[in-house]
Image (cartoon, rainbow, N blue to C red):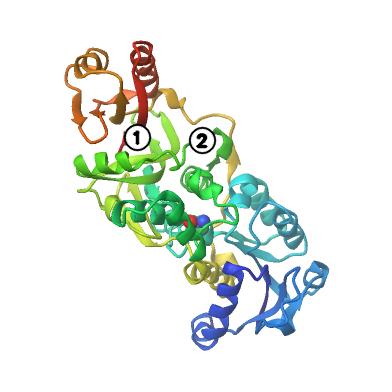
Amino acid sequence: MIEIAILGLGTVGGGTADLLESHKESIARRVGDEIHIKYILDIRELPESPYYDRIVHDYNLILNDPEVQIVAEVIGGSHPAYEFTCQAFDAGKHVVTSNKEVVATFGDELLARAAKNGVRYLFEASVGGGVPIIKPLQTDLAANDILEISGIMNGTTNYILTRMFGAGISFAEALGEAKAKGYAEADPTADVDGIDACRKIAILHAISSGQLIEPARIHTEGISAIRSEDVRAARSFGAEIKLLGRTVSCENKDTFIMVAPFLIDEGCPLAHVHDVFNGILVRGSAVGDVMFYGRGAGALPTASAVCSDILSLAKGASALPLLTFARTSEGPTDFGFFSCRRYLALKNTDENAVRVIFGANTSVTPDEESDELWVMTEEMTENAFLQSVSRLESSGASLLSHIRVY
Ligand code: HSE
């Protein structure tokens, strides 16, 4: 019997408990041993919970019980999740988590602390919800240099954008629906402003490069500025708008990391990732493009990933690859040098002025309904773009939208 404890009986904690209970027998068959939830730590009493008999409020009970080998930290937020994780390692217990905030912020330190105590720290559920991405990067794609990871990594924003494109509902209505379905973070600004996707791309970058870059140093934009005119403009270009987390290694060794909305041509598989689904495209030096697709949020999909880590540990922790992250103050490359095509919506200017500044090959489409100019630029760096916009604005033009093209 393998005894475990779950910290937090919220959406993911509840899903994890339900999955382990409902699949007790098949899990025991696959692992060769039974996995038993001995404790669930929660600050609430929860008398109606089917797990009431296992709910405890004092973490020391778990720490001091030598039978508990694995702790599933599914509390969310940095504190006390970080402190609880440290204490579990020091007590000789493995920790699995869905907590991207803790992994992206303290991953280097926690992995080192786990290794020092001879235990493991696994976090498959921290990126992609139920989609396996961390283990495949560590194992199946280990013989590749990872040239690019570009993915829709936030289910809430993808759900909102899908509803804005498909049902024509407002941003606020779509956010309300996402919250009701349990996709959004407790504070949905983390979803909408790209903070959640930023933590996730920081983790994937760290897995693929070994270097943990502080989320604060990653260029991050959200989706709240996307207007219904941008949705119409994207459609007119045969594209969808998606919030992407990206890490891109260029031939000249530049590395760019970002979270931002992108216009994605309908010919690209990422454009067809809808609703709460995540889609993560990985470009390996040997394998080429590989795409990971599935439900990126919600109780059972995320619990599926938490359970996969519990099962891996139950089958034998020593067989798992040992992971380390080094915190680096170097890189990524200055975002000012990132180059791509760009869609712009402009007012108070004309086609000639736009072409004089952005180049003769720039495509400019007047939209009669909004009285805007929809512009598609050639490839240009962020720095060149900012300079050009400032020239245009000094002649009285207004920039209403700027969305990069994938
Ligand atoms: N709020 C997150 C999302 C949950 O919408 O993707 C899963 O990390």
Q: Quadrant of the C terminus?
A: top left
Q: Secondary structure at mark 2?
A: loop
**Crowdedness near tag 2: few (<14), some (14–19) or many (≥20) residues, C-alpha within 10 Å:** many
Observer able to see residue 138 = no
Q: Position of residue 34 (x, y in %)?
A: 60, 85
Q: Nearer the viewer, residue 360 or 309?
A: 360
Crowd around label 1: few <14 · some 14–19 · many ≥20 (10 Å): some
Residue 204 vs 26, above or below: the answer is above
Q: At 54% from the left edge and 66% from the top edge, which residue is drawn?
A: 319
Asked if the residues shown at circle 2 and circle 1 are in contact, with their CB atoms under 8 angstroms apart, the answer is no
Instruction: Give, as a three-letter code, the residue at label 1.
Output: Ile
353 left or right, relative to 130:
left
- 86 left or right, relative to 329: right
User: Residue at (44%, 27%) from the top-left corner?
Assistant: 335
Sooner in the amino-acid sequence: mark 2 or mark 1: 2
> If the image is split into quadrants, where does the N terminus sit?
bottom right
At mark 1, the secondary structure is strand
Give the residue drawn at x 63%, y 58%: 76
Question: Residue 7's quadrant in the figure?
Answer: bottom right
Count of numbered labels shown in the rendering = 2
Image position, residue 345 (x, y; %): 30, 30
Question: Horizontally, is 301 left or right of 238 in the view?
Answer: right
Q: Which residue is mark 1?
A: 403
146 or 388, which is in the foreground? 388
Instruction: Evaluate whether residue 84 shows in this view.
Output: yes
The image quadrant that residue 133 belongs to is bottom left
Say which residue label 2 marks.
Answer: 218
Residue type for callout 2? Ile
Instruction: Residue at 47%, 25% (x, y): give it.
Output: 334
